[in-house]
Amino acid sequence: MNYIDLKDKSEAELLAMLKEKKLELFTLNAKQKTMQLTNTSELRVAKKDIARIQTALTAARAK
C-alpha cells in the first residue's frame, strides 16, 4: 500500500481501512504472543500501513 493510493480516497474509506488494519494488527499481535506467527515482518508492515493511513487522514482533514 502506497500513500499515492491513499490520498485519493475519501475520509470515510480511510477510516474503514484504518479500523481494518488495526484489527489485523491486533490479531497479528495475538498470534505472536501465542507463538503462531511465523512471519514476524507482517507486524512491521501492518504498523507502517496504519501510519500511512493516518497520514492520509490528516491530509484529508486539513483540506
Image (spheres, grey):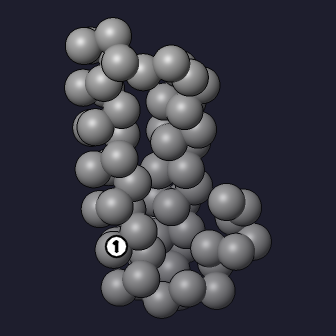
Residue name at image x 55 percent, y 68 percent:
56
- Residue 5 in view (yes/no): yes
- Residue 51 seen in this snapshot: no
Q: Is residue 32 left or right of residue 42?
A: left
Q: Position of residue 60 (x, y in %)?
A: 51, 80
Q: Which residue is drawn at 28% across and 37% down?
A: 27
Residue 44 position in % (x across, y down): 55, 30
Which x, y percent locates residue 18? 37, 62
Say whether residue 19 is left or right of residue 44.
left
Q: Which residue is drawn at 24% across and 26% down?
A: 30
Residue at x 55%, y 85% (from the top left corner): 9
Foreground residue among 58 and 17: 17
Q: Is residue 3 left or right of residue 23?
A: right
Q: Is residue 21 above or below residue 61?
A: above
Q: Name the residue under label 1.
A: 15
Is 19 above or below relative to 38? below
Residue 15: x and y in percent read: 34, 73
6 or 45: nearer the viewer = 45
Q: Classify residue 4 by image quadrant.
A: bottom right
11 shown above or below 31: below
Q: Quadrant of the N terminus?
A: bottom right
Question: Mark 1 packing: few (<14 Cα in 10 Å), some, or many (20+)?
Answer: some
The three-letter amino acid code for the residue at tag 1 is Leu
Q: Is mark 1 on a helix, strand or loop?
A: helix
